[in-house]
Image (tube, grey):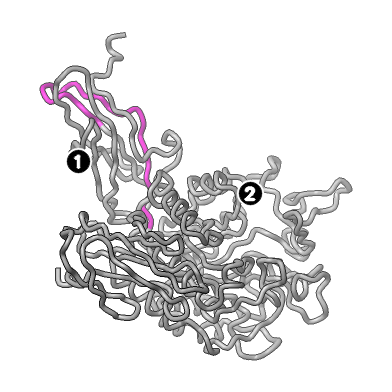
Amino acid sequence: MFSDIKVVAIENVFPEINAGKYPAKTEINEEFEVYADIFKDGHDEVAANLLFRKQGEKKWQKTPMIFLENDRWVGKFLTQSLGLHEYTIEAYPVENKEIISTYDKILKVYADRVEARFAAWYEMWPRSQGTIPNQSATFKDMENRLPEIKDMGFNVVYLTPIHPIGESFRKGKNNSFPAKPGEPGSTYCIGNKHGGHKAVETSLGTLEEFRHFVDLANKMDMEIALDIALNCSFDHPYLKEHPEWFFKNPDGSIKYAENPPKKYQDVYPLNFFTTENREELWKEMESMFLFWVEQGVKTFRIDNPHTKPFLFWEWVIKEVQKKHPDVLFLSEAFTRPKVMKLLAKSGFTQSYTYFTWRNHKHELMEYLTELTQSEVKTYMRGNLFTNTPDILPEILQKGGRAAFKTRFILAATLSSVYGIYNGFELIENKAIPGKEEYLNSEKYEYKVWDWNRPGHIKDLITKVNRIRKEHKALQAYDNLKFHYADNEHIIFYGKFSKDLKDVVFVVVNLDPFNNQGSMIYMPIEELGIGHTEIYEVRDLITNQIFTFRGKENYIELDPTREPAHILTIERWLDR
């Protein structure tokens, strides 16, 4: 029994996700910090090392851990390559380095590309990028839009499905059923005689033309993200080749998809829960992801992942990333919070969030603090989308241009990764009455947009994306901190770079209809500013300079002009 005594205790290691079952997340060439309680009985001094290695390597590297306070220690190591890394802790009495205690788990962290943390997504509906009414755009038309998207500052162009669209049971305009002759159907109804998930819709062009589109985007320092919806039309080749892969009705017929109260008569979901055919089906899905990686796609947005087994995602993401560790996965899981979190733990690089519906000050502060300051930040990166093809939030329907500006600035500055769906920049907010759905949605019809129509906010989008690229503080995810403002309609927060050389504050009027003023309380102690000291701050949106004194300062925001300030302390610009 005496041989089991641990001379030094190692407890409360952070991060440790579900007792080490799942890896934490970081980015390549970032210092990954590990915390632990390390102590022993008596009064002897202790020391500790953080051990780390790339998964698959036999030899551990080590770096000393530093005492913080109250038996809490911290260590850090640099993740210099993509993929899984392992870490653990050893500790020992200073007077006897031979008596080493080692933590009883080997923990993991996955190092992604930097774009996993810092990116601006532009969601494009492919067939709506053209100029001819009642006709699909082509990959060439989509190429013609890339310069404008690049100029606005986006670096990820995310495409809704580009696969062949089913002919049978098509949905028509505004989700009517059945479709009228000539209506193109929903792009989420995948598969026809030309192929399924490894083919492109012929009206868009050829697979070779798609590869050219991807290559052109890459040359412009943008990447293409592809929407993967694991749905099949009645005409999908899988139904003839593998009818056993689908859910069945009691009479033996294949069952179409439902998400009560919605019915998707044009879509048949694959049965990932089957045990009899699971291996064959799962491997086919892996081959589908690898096929698109071969075409140059390195980022996938997954439609409704919560309707498939967690174990499937854990397996397929791991298998794809073994071969291609730079591939990223975005989870479109607008579902229950714990389900969303487990999907993130299971391997998804990023996740959609409830930001889309968080409008009031207290709920924004509570939710974003959870995402960026709690344990959640170690395994889940929140990609804040302002809107989606399925979701036109009430605030955008009623708040007009000011609400669009506000929601954009919030998304782009609360998180280091965010996205908009095309039409947002045009203040598109025509909704089906009583619903959070677009009227005359391009999901079900061809659309031609005037990308320069009056009232757009492309200038603001361009300016804010430029600010994000120029300020390191806005490129970090977990450095968000809310500060006090005494008006419930004014939200005030800041982001600091680790070296404190870049400090950005954001003040937003959440009321799209009225001027709002507030005292804001600057965290002067953290900034080294005296209580009576005068200093200047610059609004990076308008380039206006304000003179502040000490902690308490007054601001007022008119939503009909600019509903927000993005501020930096002017006297720090020369550091």
Q: Is residue 9 left or right of residue 222?
A: left
Residue at the image point whose x is 40% and y is 43% from the top: 375
356 or 381: which is nearer to us? Answer: 356
User: Residue 324 magenta-drawn?
Assistant: no
To which residue does mark 2 refer? 308
Residues in magenta, as a range: 90-112
Q: Mark 2 belongs to which amino acid?
A: Lys
The answer to whether any part of residue 27 appears in the image is: no
In x, y percent, where is residue 472? 28, 65
Q: Mark 1 belongs to which amino acid?
A: Thr
211 or 471: which is nearer to us? Answer: 471
Element type at mark 2: loop
Asked if 323 appears above or below 564 in the picture, the reply is above
Residue at the image point whose x is 56% and y is 77% from the top: 400
Q: Is residue 361 left or right of residue 205?
A: left
The answer to whether any part of residue 61 appears in the image is: yes
To which residue does mark 1 refer? 63
Label 2 close to label 1 by CB (< 8 Å): no
Q: Quadrant for residue 101, please give it.
A: top left
In x, y percent, where is residue 286? 56, 54
